[in-house]
Amino acid sequence: MTQQVVVLGSTGSIGQSTLDVIARNRALYQVFALVAGTNVEKLVEQCIVHQPQFVVLSEASYANTFKSLLKQSPINPVPTVLSGVQAMREIAAHDDVDIVMAAIVGAAGLLPTLSAVEAGKKVLLANKEALVMTGRLFMDKVRKYNATLLPIDSEHNAIYQCLPVNLQKKHDALLSDHGVSKILLTGSGGPFLNRDIDTLASVTVSEAVSHPNWSMGQKISVDSATMMNKGLEFIEAKWLFNCEVDDIEVVIHPQSMIHSMVQYRDGSVIAQLGQPDMRTPIAYGLAYPERIDAGVAPLDFSKLANFSFMKPDFTRYPNLRLAMEACKVGQAATTTVNAANEVAVSAFLQGKIGFCDIYRVNEQTLTKQSGSDARSLDAILEIDRQARRLANDIINELR
Ligand code: NAD
Ligand code: MG
């Protein structure tokens, strides 16, 4: 039977890759709704191809622009156009929906993703910030509402593929009870792996968003350059795979062909390999436990250069260390780091602060932040707001 899919963040990098995989597998998936922030032109193009029943935009003004563009476009049937977070939540939880791709960037994706979880949907999680912000609360809801949670972040998708089925299906099972001794989280090191550290302060926006292997949205590209992305992924892995910080090791692998590995007690290491193309994990998530065509070329081992591996250098990547330390401290710290980093990266992209200031903002926000009890959603959202205020104050002092 055709499964109905909601794509949260359809106009972004992951959203577009998701629609590409769906287009290759039309007999299996139908787009029920497209949800996006501001890019109305792209949404119109997507509606022409995918004919969703609903379209949701972040704000009423964008919804109005979208409606006027719709009138000039050959779209039949015409979708119902809505706006705002509440509409996103209702659409993500709609009775007719089977699968929700959570690919809005940042904290903006949290509430619609939680609604999909609470409605017991099959949730494909790209929006790592949602899990970093809410950790235990998120995973408790997955269990309580019997949602199916599939990681789309390529590393976590790789780890998931390398785990025994019993661990894939039980979010509260212990790795050690299933023979797993370590999760090896790989990362490319980003565009500045070999750059002279003394010149990092002068990194420009275009240098920071040019990833050597992956094509991604702006925020995650900057996060990859600072390796805060790997820090967020470290926290993400702790929650997804129910483990402690000592169970996860970050390994630099500049070629981005091995997407992560799982080490077992008997000495075996299982790795997942593939092209650096997000359509592979997206197709895996859509079809799980089956396999479908993703449009990704097979690896040609005769053409692969040597694989290399190294430990991360925390002097080069202080944000990675900061996130790993926050992970040890607990939920309030990880919510704070995530919020500060979103504010800092946005300020960097707008040219308000330098590349190395991203760390300064994150570190100082974490030092000044005072909240500790982060169990309820309200408490978490309050810590998030407080961290954003602090980060903005620090940015104003830096300028
Ligand atoms: P992107 O910037 O390309 O796209 C973001 C999407 O979110 C857009 O569709 C945008 O319209 C939408 N959006 C932003 N604010 C919104 C709001 N307030 N309401 C509704 N929609 C809003 O980002 P991306 O690279 O596609 O990344 C999306 C998520 O997936 C991020 O959390 C990222 O960390 C994660 N991720 C991305 C990749 C990748 O290869 N791009 C890999 C792993 C994980
Ligand atoms: Mg990743």
Image (cartoon, grey):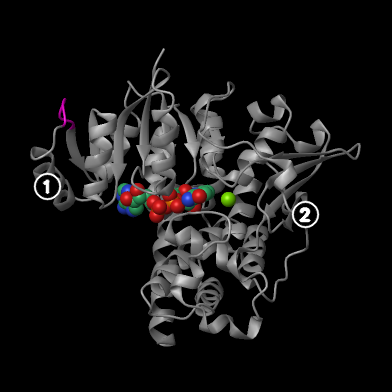
The one of 70 and 111 positioned closer to us in this rendering: 70
Q: Is 109 covered by the magenta stretch?
A: no
Check disc 2 and report the residue beneath it: 306
Q: Position of residue 33 (x, y in %)?
A: 29, 32
* Dot 2 amino acid type: Asn
Residue 19 seen: yes
Q: Position of residue 237 (x, y in %)?
A: 64, 47
Query: First in sequence: mark 1 or mark 2?
Result: 1
The one of 284 and 331 positioned closer to us in this rendering: 284
Residue sitting at 38 percent across and 28 percent down? 5
Q: Main secondary structure of the magenta part?
A: loop
Q: Position of residue 392 (x, y in %)?
A: 39, 75
Q: Residue furthest right?
A: 266
The one of 191 and 377 positioned closer to us in this rendering: 191
Q: What is the magenta range?
A: 75-79
* Dot 1 amino acid type: Asn
Residue 128 vertical position relative to residue 273 in the rendered view, above or below:
below
Residue sitting at 13 percent across and 37 percent down? 73
Q: Disc 1 or disc 2, which is closer to the eye?
A: 2
